Structure formats: C-alpha cells, structure tokens
C-alpha cells in the first residue's frame, strides 16, 4: 500500500494474523495509519495485525517496523471479502 509520498508498505497475506473493525480506535506507535487526512478526523475501517513486525518506508526514506496497520478505504466491504478469501486460500 502507498499513501502519497509519505508511507509505503508491502504486506504478504501470510503475515496477517487478525482483521478487526476500526471502531473504536486509539493511535499507537506500533500502528501504521493509512488514513488520508481530511478536514475532520477519520476512523479506520480495519486494523490488520501482523504475525511479525513489518518494515515500512516513511517520509524521506526513513524505515520503521510496525505490528499493526490501520486503514481507511473507499470500498471496505469489497476489501474485507477479498482479503478473507485470499487468507482462506493460505490455510
């Protein structure tokens, strides 16, 4: 996933351990947020937890590992169905 020039991460399906709905959500240093900034604060649709920390590239090429990723999507239900389908294939 890529959010403008500020964040980039590649998440293999096999490293996702859990999918949670995003509400309620508290920010954390272990959670990478893929939420486009708007006039009002947006809540993520989903929070993906990883089996192992995954490295992301941040602004100016800095790298950091994260245990979770909070994402806000245009089509959350379609994403959830696709993600669950792909994860079932791995089992």
Image (cartoon, rainbow, N blue to C red):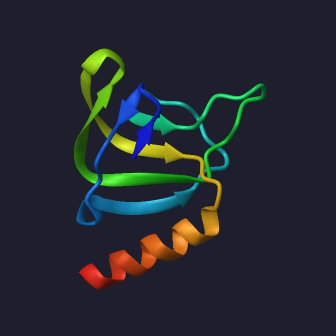
Residue 87 relative to residue 44: left or right = left
Q: Pick whichever, 73 or 28, lies toward us.
A: 73
Residue 1 relative to residue 77: left or right = left
Q: Pick whichever, 16 or 36, lies toward us.
A: 36
Residue 74 relative to residue 12: left or right = right
What residue is at 26 percent from the left and 19 percent from the top? 62
User: Where does the image place residue 87, in percent across and percent down from the top left?
Assistant: 34, 75
What residue is at 33 percent from the left and 62 percent from the top? 17
User: Where does the image place residue 12, in percent across and percent down from the top left?
Assistant: 25, 59
What residue is at 38 percent from the left and 53 percent from the top? 49
Which quadrant does the C terminus fall into?
A: bottom left
Work out which residue is located at the far top of the displayed protein and give it: 60
Q: How many marks?
A: 0
Question: Compared with residue 68, is residue 64 higher up or lower down, i.e. above or below?
Answer: above
Image quadrant of residue 46? bottom right
Question: Compared with residue 4, is residue 73 higher up or lower down, i.e. above or below?
Answer: below
Question: Compared with residue 40, is residue 9 higher up or lower down, i.e. above or below?
Answer: below
User: Where does the image place residue 71, in percent across and percent down from the top left?
Assistant: 53, 47
User: Where does the image place residue 16, in percent across and percent down from the top left?
Assistant: 32, 60
Q: Pick whichever, 24 or 91, lies toward us.
A: 91
Work out which residue is located at the far right of the displayed protein and give it: 40
What residue is at 66 percent from the left and 45 percent from the top? 24
């Amino acid at each position: 996933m890529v959010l403008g020039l500020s964040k980039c991460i590649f998440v293999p399906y096999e490293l996702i351990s859990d999918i949670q709905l995003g509400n309620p959500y508290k920010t954390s240093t272990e959670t990478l947020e893929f939420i486009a900034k708007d006039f009002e604060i947006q809540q993520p649709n989903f929070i993906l937890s990883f089996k192992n920390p995954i490295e992301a590239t941040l602004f100016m090429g800095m790298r950091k590992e994260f245990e979770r990723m909070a994402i806000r999507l245009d089509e959350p239900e379609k994403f959830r169905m696709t993600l669950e389908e792909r994860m079932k294939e791995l089992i």
